[in-house]
Image (spheres, helix red, strand yellow):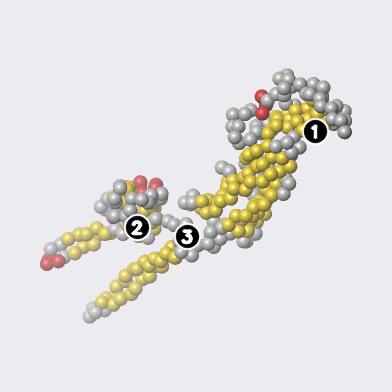
Amino acid sequence: MTPLVDGSFEIREMHMGINGRRLDRSQMAARGYTLSATDFHIVIEIPVGSPDGHYKSHAPDNQYHVTYLVEPMLENPEPLVTTYFLSLIFGFIILPEETPFAHQVKLQASLQDVDLPTITGTCDQNQFHISVKYGSQGNNFKAMVGNQQLTPEMADYQFQENGTHFSVILPYTAKDTTFELMTSDSVRAHVDFFLLHTRNEWVLADLLLSCNFPLTTTKCYSNGTMVATAVKVDSVTNMIPSRLTLKDQSCKPTFSDDRFAHFSFNVASCGTTRTVSVY
């Protein structure tokens, strides 16, 4: 079988079926079927006598023959196409004996009638707000936040769903977000949100939402204490917050995790300097 496209295209997925029914890899292995592709052909190997075919006897010119018939099917799925199948059985009467005879026909039609889901997003001062509108296939997809599949049970997120949409709210400090840039009064973070087809792993829609969030990185208190916050950004992948120090290397974080380091110290310690402003 020669492909209908030239070599400038790449076949990402290829599936095989018999009698209009797609087979998975375990079913193919059990039957001894193989499916492969060369530079110019798609090759299917089916053993004679496989359970999905049938034998038929012939006697042309009074010579007995047996043929083995099998109806393989190739399926090259497309994200925007729905394939419809209709099985019909025609009843005939063979004259003059009036012998009944049935013939089965399977019809197939493919229509480009799929509306894909869409994703929109906004931010407030602390959270990402993401909304997904279902397409014509409903919620037949997996929602992914970064590399993690979204489920209603995820504790950090607020999840709501109805028949046409679902929405999720997540704090910018959630573990599936990424910090891009830190300034003295804000941090820029983004979340990568996308939808995968449940069976074929196609990316049906995606959204990279990036926003600036207010963040006080340093603060002074009237009792002479100062607090400072350091944030690990995506461009400094090797940084370990717990190993950060202030100018005085004996001043280490009072609290840290894999993304933040918090310092609390007296303003007369840790190598701080004083500036006198005259108005």
User: Circle 1 is placed at which residue position?
Assistant: 219
Q: Judging from the image, what secondary structure is the residue with disc 3 in? A: loop
| Residue identified by numbered label 2 | 73
Query: Which x, y percent locates residue 45?
Result: 29, 50
**Which residue: 50% across, 62% down?**
114
Of residues 31 and 213, the one nearer the viewer is 213
Q: Residue at x 59, y 29 (%)?
A: 238
Q: Of discs 1 and 2, which sits in the foreground?
A: 1
Q: Determine whether label 1 and label 2 are within 8 Å by CB.
A: no
Q: Earlier in the sequence, mark 1 or mark 2?
A: 2
State if disc 2 and disc 3 touch (CB < 8 Å): no
- Secondary structure under tag 1 reads strand
- Tell me which amino acid carries mark 3: Leu
Is residue 17 visible in this depiction of the protein?
no
Work out whether residue 59 can be spotted: yes
Give residue 164's position: percent from left, percent from top. Answer: 62, 61
Q: The disc labelled 1 sits on which kind of residue?
A: Lys
Residue lying at the far bottom in this picture: please name it.
96
